[in-house]
Amino acid sequence: MNSAAQPSPKPSAVPGDAGLTTGVLARRLGVSPMTLRSWDRRYGIGPTARTEGGHRRWTAADVATVEEMCRLTATGVPPADAARAARAFAAGPLPAAVVAAASAPAPPAGRSRVAGALPLGDVRQECRGLARAAVRLDAPALDKQLTAAVERYGVVVAWQEVMVPTLHAVGRRWASSEDRYVEVEHLLAWHVSTVLRRSAPPAAPVAAPAAGCVLLACVPGEQHTLPLEALHAALAREGLPVRMLGAAVPFEALDAAVRRLGPVAVVLWAQERARAAPALARHVAGLRWGMKGARRGPAVLLGGPGWSRSQPDGVLRPAGLAQAVEALRALCTAG
């Protein structure tokens, strides 16, 4: 529920070259000019000076106030509450109770049904701030919040309970809004990918083919790599040797990689049912290498909703990222 609009202070006159325009400030903060105008109209967080020609300008004090507003909303504080805290910030030191309420991190088990412009539902508190940053196309806030989620919860929980719900919310809004929010989904997915890759330590060496590794690949034609990137980061952080082949790996390339690396396990991802290839899974599971009498082959794990009706016998089907990590850890330890 929005609070009543707050009247802006009476503008003071400034020279024409003093203060910032709304457009310049929006670019500096990484938000849209429309967002700044909305905050001004709804909450009184706006420019307080005018040039001699009557043009509104943001003074240094105005900028400090709106920067505080951006900081608070990026952490998930509702805009009306953030505006009150930002105005108090501009007026002087914040009371301890306001600081605690506005700036304290959400508890791990926190849930929120408020999602700004996105239909998040019952999710962790962190998803709210992430959704708002995504809708604002606020790249620095996205990077900061995603990194903090991984550092706080680890890759598995951050992926399952922070990244995925927000990605799904953007996807639902895109599907129901005639191709709006495409830019939101692309920016969010890019930063999720960036943070996942950055969170993985350098690749562990593989004494191929004796020691083996875990090989990750999307089936031919499949472009959805984010779930495999999450698995790659989780395995790498556990110190397990893992190799990522990425999107749309051709049959011949996958076959060659398996024969060269001798992996302990191969994970095949299929997001869409039309891409799932049972014959490919059976082929990979049947590959063998090593000396006669001691030949070995990979375990095959299938990931993604595309395999729902296409699961061949003799392969594993983890229910999610946590189960996949557990199964692969066991395979690598046994191998």
Image (cartoon, helix red, strand yellow):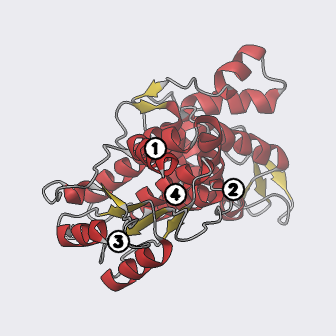
Kind of residue at disc 4 = His
Label 3: how many Cα within 10 Å (few below 14, some 14–19, many 20+): some
Q: Say left or right for 205 vs 298.
A: right
Marks 3 and 4, the one that precedes in the sequence: 4
Which residue matches tag 3?
Answer: 288
Residue 14: percent from the left, percent from the top? 85, 55
Marks 1 and 4, the one that precedes in the sequence: 4
Which label lies toward us, 3 or 4?
3
Measured Cα–Cα span from mark 2 to mark 1: 47 Å
Residue under the point 70% across and 33% down: 86
Are dots 1 and 3 in contact, CB under 8 Å?
no
Q: Is residue 328 above or below residue 244?
A: above
Pick out the residue farthest to the bottom.
Answer: 252
Q: Is residue 80 above or below residue 268?
A: above
Kind of residue at disc 1 = Ala
Marks 4 and 2, the one that precedes in the sequence: 2
Measured Cα–Cα span from mark 3 to mark 4: 24 Å
Pick out the residue farthest to the top.
Answer: 97
Measured Cα–Cα span from mark 4 to mark 2: 33 Å
Q: Is residue 167 above or below residue 123?
A: below
Which residue matches tag 4?
Answer: 232
Image quadrant where one finds the N terminus? top left
Residue under the point 52% across and 41% down: 158
Marks 1 and 3, the one that precedes in the sequence: 3
Which residue matches tag 1?
Answer: 330
Kind of residue at disc 3 = Arg
